[in-house]
Image: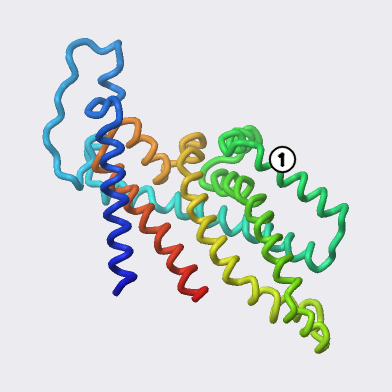
Amino acid sequence: MSLVWRLLATLAAGAILTALLVRTAPGYGSNERDLDIRRNGPASSQPSLPWWYSREFHAPIHQLVAQRAMPTALAVTGGLALAWLISLASALASTRWPSRTLENGAFAGAMLLQCLPAGLLALLLLVFGFRGALAVALALALALGPRVWQVSRAILAHAAASPCLLLARAQGFGPWRLIARRLLPLAAPELRALGAVSVTLAISLAIPLETILDVPGLGQLAWQAALSRDLPLLVQLMTLVTLVVVVAGELARSKSA
């Protein structure tokens, strides 16, 4: 029951803070059409609409979310899976076959990718012909992969120095059995926590990436809602994002307990 109350309190706090930030921001109550100097006459006042209705798109918010949820879900899931697959495989390989040359090369590549903004990665993918949710997933993997690799490598290296692994080696465990039966279970709590953080980063990166790559997902919808000061749409989108982040964090915490 405490989990339910904590989840409800977090969602309520996220919705209230989002509403306060948008309501007190400069230009609230106007949109891009009102600020267009090519239009003559005063800005027309909008009629009062219910909180489940978008003022900018003139449609129920649940319909907008349902129409745009799938591209974002595919892009975020694919980007996270690709980033974790490559990063964890590289970290395990460096643990299994330590090599100073390969480690330095991987570290230099990871630092280079971390220095590149996600928007620049998206533009480079556009130049090479990638489009749609696939381009967003690849950009997410390129942006998240180096960070996941750097932290997971440190987690696995710390776990590899544990006395229980020395005992397993003394008991005759082979290298792959040692990784599967001892190393990964020992590092699992920290890796789950890293997974929850990577979900948060992926969702935040999806907003500019979908906007740059013109993917009709929830990230692009949030960007358009912010530009038009669509308070009901912004509050409900941020509540949805808060729900996903909190659930991911609670899952990582419950598994670690």
Looking at the image, which residue is at 28% across and 33% down? 229
Where residue 36 sits: x, y (%)? Answer: 30, 16
Left/right of residue 45 with respect to residue 246 in the rendered view: left
Three-letter code for the amino acid on which mark 1 is drawn = Leu
Tell me if mark 1 has few (under 14), some (14-19) or many (20+) residues whose alpha carbon lies within 10 angstroms of its own. Answer: few
Q: Which residue is mark 1?
A: 112
Q: Who is closer to the viewer here, 64 or 46?
A: 46
Where residue 134 sits: x, y (%)? Answer: 56, 47
Looking at the image, which residue is at 59% across and 44% down? 139
Looking at the image, which residue is at 40% across and 60% down? 246
Q: Who is closer to the viewer here, 117 or 6?
A: 6
Where residue 237 sits: x, y (%)? Answer: 33, 48
Q: Is residue 79 above or below residue 155?
A: above
**Label 1 secondary element:** helix
Q: Quadrant of the N terminus?
A: bottom left
| Quadrant in the rendering for residue 116 | top right
